Amino acid sequence: MAAALNKEMFDLGMAPNAIRAMFEYGIDRAEEIGAENIFNYSIGNPSIEPPEEFNQAIIDLMNNMDALELHGYSLTPGDKGFRQAIAENLTRRFGIRADRNNVFITCGCTAALTICIKALTSKPEDEFIAFVPYFPEYRVFVETMGGTFVECEPDEKEFQINFDALERILNPNTKALIINTPNNPTGTVLREDVVKRLVDLLHRKEQEYGHAIYIISDEPYREVVYDDIKVPFFPNLYENTFVCYSFSKTLSIPGDRIGYIFVPDEIEDKYDTYKTLVGTGRALSFVCAPMFLQQICAKCLDVTSDIEVYRKNRDLLYGALIEYGFDVIHPDGAFYLWMKAPGGDADAFVELAKKYELLLVTGATFGDSKYVRLAYCVDEDMIRRSLPAFKKLAEECHLK
Ligand code: PLP
């Protein structure tokens, strides 16, 4: 490696990504034995089309909006009209007081998260807590932005919050907790009583330490939720909250890279906080998100892709896996199943599953090597075809 290169970035570039590796293995394997014989549960790419309103908005904008404006730079934190429309949407849905000065448009949740983390990091001692199992990029973002990444051990029974573990790791260096509900990879949604307990604990700790502890609420799956389960809206419950939202899964447009940060008026030093986000966006060059996407999404704030399709997939796959004897967490949202690896070794189980052309992702990627993740944002037909393979796998593991 050339001495001029940044070693940390080189190592990151070389580091394997288990999700991508399995996804690509699936593509190669499909070429060898036929796509219909591969059961690829590796990646969280939406499997349902964007809603009709999304396509219609594109046509309307192409016909009616000045092309130079449509494809021009927006303001640094995003188009005024789009930010105001988001604020009004949140006010309508959650009763919160908001206007465009509470909203900063980003290229998806990843940019939103990176901006929030960098905005809060002044020194290496600044700690960011994530709950095991967690989206693997959290560690990358925190460490690259110069903070310290801290894992909170899971509540293995329900994958809510292990408060004993959390109390053990909270300390005066704690800057923020990264919350992700509905969760990737478990599919769980934090219950109201758990959220209340969390908020009470953080208020107590803020008093004790004499400074703010932030919640960074990572919400790409806010709308991907089933059976009338309520997803907490943290700004109504906890002042020092950053919401990181994305349209990637809501509208099935992950490649279009659009989302936002929302900060409530009640956050400490709201004006300075917002300006810090703007400065951080500038430093990371995450400014002026694509105007075209901003204009389209402004017309789609009240619609989602057909989430019912994922609910059907969940019921089909969850029901079958439970019947075959697997130990699976019941998901309330997102489009993932979190399954205990029979024998307790996720890597070994993932290899065994490959024998049946079942492509799963090891939980080690998410900080817990006793579980595997299945992404069920796939064709229902693929799930049906894969069930005999799961049955054989269960038999080989002597589950019943
Ligand atoms: N956070 C979680 C938990 C995710 O699962 C994902 C994507 O899968 C992201 C963030 C990134 O989302 P975006 O496409 O909005 O950058």
Image (tube, rainbow, N blue to C red):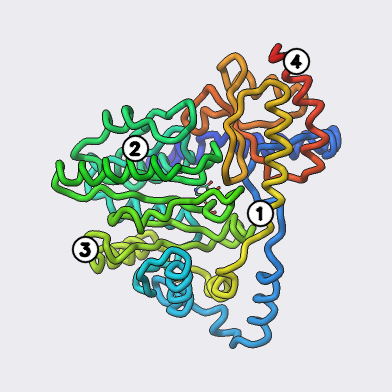
Mark 2 highlights which residue?
149
Q: Is residue 75 visible?
A: yes
> What amino acid type should be assigned to the residue bearing mark 1?
Ile
Check disc 4 and report its element: helix, strand or loop.
helix
Q: Which residue is mark 3?
A: 269
Question: What whole-number distance in Å separates the C-alpha atoms at marks 2 and 4?
Answer: 40 Å
Q: Is label 3 in contact with label 2 (beta carbons under 8 Å)?
A: no
**49, 231: nearer the viewer:** 231
* Alpha carbon distance from label 1 to label 2: 33 Å
Is the residue at mark 4 in contact range of ligand 1, meaning its CB lies under 8 Å from it? no
| Three-letter residue code for mark 4 | Glu
Helix, strand or loop at mark 3: loop
Q: Nearer the viewer, mark 3 or mark 2?
A: 3
Mark 1 residue element: loop
- Foreground of the two, 235 or 14: 235
Q: Position of residue 199 (x, y in %)?
A: 31, 46
